[in-house]
């Protein structure tokens, strides 16, 4: 797809305002990444301890709603097919993202 062709592994694409600190990225808009595997995770937390609602899409299709509050490992997606896919996260308030991992 066009999105997959434009994204590169290891790069986080942010749409909107963000700040990059030494250990985390803080944003309140949306981000996209290219993922490979059946499962995708991230370590994240709400910046102000208020729940952050995230709408997750895989290759442009809505797959789940995720609520992030305390700092921990969250499962972003679990898909049936082991393939390269774009994951998009639409975020409604300030979120701190520390890392991503894939299985």
Image (spheres, rainbow, N blue to C red):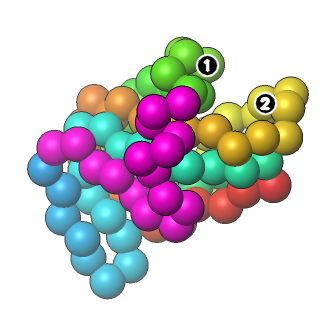
Q: Is residue 53 magenta?
A: no
State the residue position of label 2.
Answer: 79
Q: Secondary structure at mark 2?
A: strand
* Residue beneath the point at 26% across and 76% down: 21
Q: Secondary structure at mark 1?
A: strand
Q: Is residue 11 magenta?
A: yes
Q: Say which label, 2 or 1, has the lower sequence index.
A: 1
**What is the x, y in percent for residue 68?**
48, 40
State the residue position of label 1.
Answer: 63
In the rendered view, tell whether residue 85 sits above or below residue 22.
Answer: above
Where does the magenta region start and end?
1-16
Observer-nearest residue: 70 or 98? 98
* Residue beneath the point at 27% across and 58% down: 26
User: Pointers 2 and 1 in contact (CB under 8 A)?
Assistant: yes
**What is the x, y in percent for residue 91?**
33, 34
Q: Residue furthest top?
A: 62
**What is the x, y in percent for residue 40?**
68, 47
In this rendering, position of residue 73 left or right of residue 16: right
Residue density around tag 2, few if under 14, some if 14–19, many if 20 or more, within 10 Å: few
Q: Is residue 67 visible?
A: no
Distance CA(mark 2)–CA(mark 1): 9 Å
Q: Is residue 36 visible?
A: yes
Q: Residue furthest left?
A: 17
* Residue beneath the point at 67% across and 61% down: 101
Observer-nearest residue: 90 or 53? 90
In the rendered view, tell whether residue 3 sits above or below residue 99.
Answer: above
């Amino acid at each position: 797809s066009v999105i997959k062709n434009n994204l590169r592994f290891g790069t986080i694409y942010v749409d909107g305002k963000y700040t990059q600190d030494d250990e985390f990225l803080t944003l309140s808009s949306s981000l996209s990444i290219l993922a490979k595997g059946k499962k995708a995770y991230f370590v994240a937390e709400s910046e102000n301890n208020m729940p952050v609602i995230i709408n997750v899409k895989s290759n442009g299709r809505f797959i789940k709603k995720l609520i992030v509050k305390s700092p921990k490992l969250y499962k972003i997606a679990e898909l049936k097919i082991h393939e390269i896919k774009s994951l998009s996260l639409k975020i409604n308030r300030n979120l701190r993202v520390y890392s991503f991992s894939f299985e």
